[in-house]
Amino acid sequence: MIVLGIESSCDETAAAVVNEKREILGQALLSQAEHIRYGGVVPEIAARSHLEHIDQIIAECLVKANLKINDIDAVAASAGPGLIGGVVVGVTAAKTIALALSKPFIAVNHLEGHALCARLTEDISYPYLLLLVSGGHCQILIVKNVGEYERLGTTIDDAAGEAFDKVSKMLGLGYPGGPLIEKAAQQGDSSRFVLPRPLIGSNDCNMSFSGLKTAVRRIVETFSEDGDISKANLSPQDIADIAASFQCALTDCLLKKLQKAIVLFKQKCPEGKHLVVSGGVAANTYLRQNLENLAQKNHLVFAAPPIRFCTDNGVMVAWAGLERLKAGYVSDLDFKPRPRWPLDDKAPKAAGAGGVKA
Ligand code: KG4
Ligand code: ZN
């Protein structure tokens, strides 16, 4: 079984081919640099860029895999959630190939791509506890099977990656913020600035990062004579210390809520063995180390995709497509891309999970 996966839901145009033996046969990825000057992704620019590059990315991926388009068994694409202009480009490309070759089309929930990706590179059986942390989402879920998710907690405002990006902008570091904050934090003192840990005492597994971001802003304001943060006079050491304090506070929040989630997970799924982290923020080494310790303390095995597969890529879409195909789920060619698409959609599994049982 060979599946081609296409990703175009944000600012990466990507394609990959994987097979049942968990081999990545080929992959190609283009990170759109056009957005850097705007400090964030501009949806219309992203959609145009996907349109311009998608054919060439798919072709490049197949050449690297040494495959002809006819050798693939199915075509999967991220069909939401995401920036709809880009999603439509990837889904249309996938449907067109599927129609022309009379092969199945598989609408993949982008979040399912992140959620299942670690199973490609590590032996992880269902059920497992998942922290999904990306630019648009921050959720704690039990992954019970393909298309079967139970959400234990979510952010009630900003996503973790969004907080990294906004704090990075305040510090004048640039976009995407996560890797830049992580790098700056390596030279920083995380105890220099006292930052809040929002919702840390609440009894549920929900999270909040908006107040944390505002608290960072207040600190940056104190470095500016008139309170305008664009004129803040921050030394490299100040930036490093704020970055480290922020990264530590955000990680503390995630750890606290995960600890609660682990208790629930063990009650609900005593057979579960793994704590998995995925999504762009899972590329953060400080977070990964802390999660590994948390897992060990709770007698769970920690797992995460390799850092290059944490941020958006085609491999995760191809792999989720393959898992869907193996489970017998394919999608109709009239499947409408979904700008919003919760992973734990309560719609009947077939439709809500983006597929119908073949
Ligand atoms: O999963 P992803 O590529 O796209 C979405 O589906 O949103 O995640 C992108 C997010 C950005 O907010 C980026 O700043 C963050 O992941 N990110 C990181 C790191 N690398 C990427 N955050 C913290 N530390 C990192 N090393
Ligand atoms: Zn993503």
Image (spheres, helix red, strand yellow):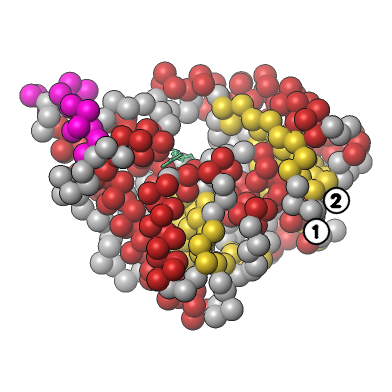
- Of 188 and 349, nearer the camera is 188
Location of the C terminus (image quadrant): bottom right
Q: Would residue 52 be found to the left or right of residue 261 on screen?
A: right
Kindly give the residue lying farthest to the left in the view shown.
225
The amino acid at mark 1 is Lys
Disc 1 and disc 2 in contact, CB within 8 angstroms:
yes
User: Helix, strand, or loop for circle 2?
Assistant: loop
Q: Nearer the viewer, mark 1 or mark 2?
A: 2
Amino acid of disc 2: Met
Residue at 52 percent across and 67 percent down: it is 301
Name above or below for residue 347 compared with residue 46.
Answer: below
Q: Determine whether the residue tagged by mark 1 lies in a helix, strand or loop.
A: helix
Q: Nearer the viewer, residue 210 or 29?
A: 29
Disc 1: which residue: 326
Would you say 354 lies left or right of 86 here? right
The reply to whether residue 355 is visible in this rendering is no
Question: Marks 1 and 2, Cα distance to the nearest angstrom?
Answer: 9 Å
Q: What stretch of residues is rendered in magenta?
A: 225-241
Query: In the image, residue 307 lies at what x, y percent?
Result: 53, 43
Residue drawn where x is 86% and y is 41% of the image: 72
Q: Residue at x 16, y 38 (%)?
A: 218
In the rendered view, would you say 297 is above or below 30? below
Q: Is residue 234 magenta?
A: yes
- Determine whether, in the image, residue 357 is placed left or right of residue 183: right
Give the x, y percent position of residue 140. Answer: 47, 61
Mark 2 lies within 8 Å of ligand 2 (Cβ measured): no
Q: Name the residue that disc number 2 marks.
A: 1
